[in-house]
């Protein structure tokens, strides 16, 4: 084996995998480099709840032995991947950042985790989240808040804040998150990385602890679009364990060939939804996004304004449906079969009540109560039934827009990363952080967030949305955005500190 070169915190998934497959790097040396960064700096960020140092190193050694024996390794050979802690991992605890599941160790892998392992990725640990994925700041974790690697006094977004922060900090070149109302895209935007929410049904939910089953979707968080596309190709596809998964339909021919000029967007029609650019949108968000749109126009895209008229009711609709489904899904956590139990001398119902009150945080309890109310007799039609009808209107809005354009482009988040604690006491203000992302989940369409490289001083995300099964089209536009950006790929101060540690 040739001499091992140092691992850097901004290297791509593709670079790592190629080097390990070719024998230029050992999977063990790569894995140890990332684990050492976590040990050195994650106490400042708080992106991980569990780091599987021993398991990850042993798995990496097995990959090295296989390669040395002549085996051809998979597309993610030796790539350390962080996994959101609401995805089941065989033999490795899965807490959903809840005290209720503090000691829960699943006996099986989620399908996406199995597919990572089949592709020879190394799962290095489980990342922090808002408890049961309910939140937009990763401050609702039952264990610790996560801090933004760009500014440790600000939030990383949520609920996949631990995964986004881990990638932005250089603790992992890739991570998996889940997106119910923006929980991959919003933290990706606030942390300056790439995040994809796939079409509903493109990626299996088997082994994902359910929040809202008709909205949840698993997706990748990476440094760049090519890495996101690679991770997506590994985890996507039908799964017999999840009947909602589906194979993609044929594209309409608007995708470019692999050899095409990445910055050429001639033939693509891109819509700008006017409702996503309200007068209240701050300039530190609107200016870099509009500059990115101008570059897409300059690359040949036919850019035109469109309307999504029911956007103003998307948040209300989302929180009725999501909380109703959460109320149903979380009923299984009764402390009888598993989970933290508070013994009670009276009866089993009292034991369940005390266990859930002690184990579930205030935001989860709030959402369960709201959802239970919306589903209760006398209110079901007024709330849940009406929300379902409005969801159909929102879906029709997107279908109408996609009759005229191939994709939509807008900001991912209406705000840059906000200070820790600034919205915790105002749930409605926190819920409004999802105003530009929740509609995609309600409609079941794919959406990609890519960083605007000229945003300053905090990251801003450009959101690209398309019809169902149009992920390749979103990747094409995202790659063009990267090629057209004059600024280099930005790196967070924590990633820079990690690089300096490597150099020393």
Image (cartoon, rainbow, N blue to C red):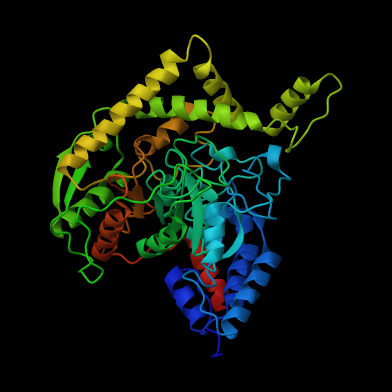
Q: Residue at x 30, y 33 (%)?
A: 395
468 is higher (above) or lower (below) than 234 = above
Image quarter where the N terminus lies is bottom right
- Observer able to see residue 97: yes
Q: Camera-side residue: 146 or 53? A: 53
- Give left or right: position of 255 versus 129: left
Q: Camera-side residue: 8 or 225? A: 225
Query: Residue most toward the front?
Result: 240
Q: Give percent across and percent down for residue 85.
A: 60, 49
Q: Camera-side residue: 338 or 459? A: 338
Please tell me how many numbered marks the rendered image carries.
Answer: 0
Q: Residue at x 63, y 80 (%)?
A: 65
Q: Give percent across and percent down for residue 200.
A: 40, 43
350 is higher (above) or lower (below) than 394 = above
Q: Give percent across and percent down for residue 259.
A: 23, 72
Q: Residue at x 28, y 46 (%)?
A: 466
- Give left or right: position of 281 versus 193: left
- Observer able to see residue 426: no
Quarter of the rendering containing residue 338 = top right
């Amino acid at each position: 084996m040739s001499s091992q070169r140092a691992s850097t915190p901004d290297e791509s998934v593709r670079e790592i995998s190629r080097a390990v497959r070719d024998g230029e790097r050992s999977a063990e040396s790569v894995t140890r480099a990332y684990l050492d960064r976590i040990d050195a700096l994650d106490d400042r960020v708080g992106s991980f709840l569990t780091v599987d140092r021993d398991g990850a190193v042993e798995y990496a050694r097995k990959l090295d032995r296989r390669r040395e024996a002549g085996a051809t390794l998979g597309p993610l050979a030796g790539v350390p991947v962080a996994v959101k802690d609401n995805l089941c991992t065989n033999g490795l605890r899965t807490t959903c950042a809840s005290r209720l599941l503090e000691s829960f160790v699943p006996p099986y892998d989620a399908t996406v985790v199995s597919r990572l392992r089949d592709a020879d990725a190394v799962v290095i640990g489980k990342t922090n989240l808002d408890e049961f994925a309910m939140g937009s700041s990763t401050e609702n974790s039952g264990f610790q808040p996560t801090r933004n690697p760009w500014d440790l006094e600000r939030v990383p977004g949520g609920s996949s804040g631990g995964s986004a922060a881990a990638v932005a900090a250089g603790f992992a070149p890739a991570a998996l998150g889940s997106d119910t109302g923006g929980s991959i895209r919003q933290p990706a935007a606030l942390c300056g990385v790439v995040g994809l929410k796939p079409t509903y049904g493109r990626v299996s939910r088997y082994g994902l602890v359910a929040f809202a089953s008709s909205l949840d979707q698993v997706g990748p968080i990476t440094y760049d679009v090519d890495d996101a596309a690679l991770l997506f190709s590994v985890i996507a596809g039908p799964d017999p364990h999840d009947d909602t998964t589906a194979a993609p339909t044929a594209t309409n021919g608007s995708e470019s060939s692999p050899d095409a000029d990445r910055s050429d967007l001639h033939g693509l029609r891109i819509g700008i939804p006017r409702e996503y650019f309200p007068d209240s949108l701050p300039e530190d968000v609107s200016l870099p996004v509009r500059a990115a749109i101008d570059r897409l126009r300059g690359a040949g895209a036919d850019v035109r304004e469109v309307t999504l008229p029911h956007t103003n009711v998307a948040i209300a609709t989302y929180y009725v449906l999501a909380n109703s489904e959460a109320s149903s899904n979380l009923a299984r956590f009764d402390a009888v079969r598993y989970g933290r139990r508070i013994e009670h001398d009276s009866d089993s119902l009292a034991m369940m009540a005390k266990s859930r009150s002690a184990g579930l945080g205030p935001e989860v309890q709030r959402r369960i109560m709201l959802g239970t109310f919306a589903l209760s007799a006398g209110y079901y039609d007024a709330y849940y039934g009406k929300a379902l009808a409005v969801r159909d209107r929102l879906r029709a809005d997107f279908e109408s827009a996609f009759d005229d354009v191939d994709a939509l482009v807008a900001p991912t988040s209406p705000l840059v990363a906000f200070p820790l604690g600034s919205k915790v006491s105002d749930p409605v203000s926190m819920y409004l952080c999802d105003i530009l992302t929740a509609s995609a989940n309600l409609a079941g369409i794919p959406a990609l967030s890519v960083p605007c490289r000229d945003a300053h001083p905090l990251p801003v995300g450009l959101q690209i949305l398309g019809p169902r099964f149009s992920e390749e089209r979103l990747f094409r536009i995202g790659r063009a955005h990267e090629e057209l950006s004059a600024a280099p790929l930005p790196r967070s101060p924590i990633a820079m500190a990690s690089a300096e540690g490597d150099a020393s």
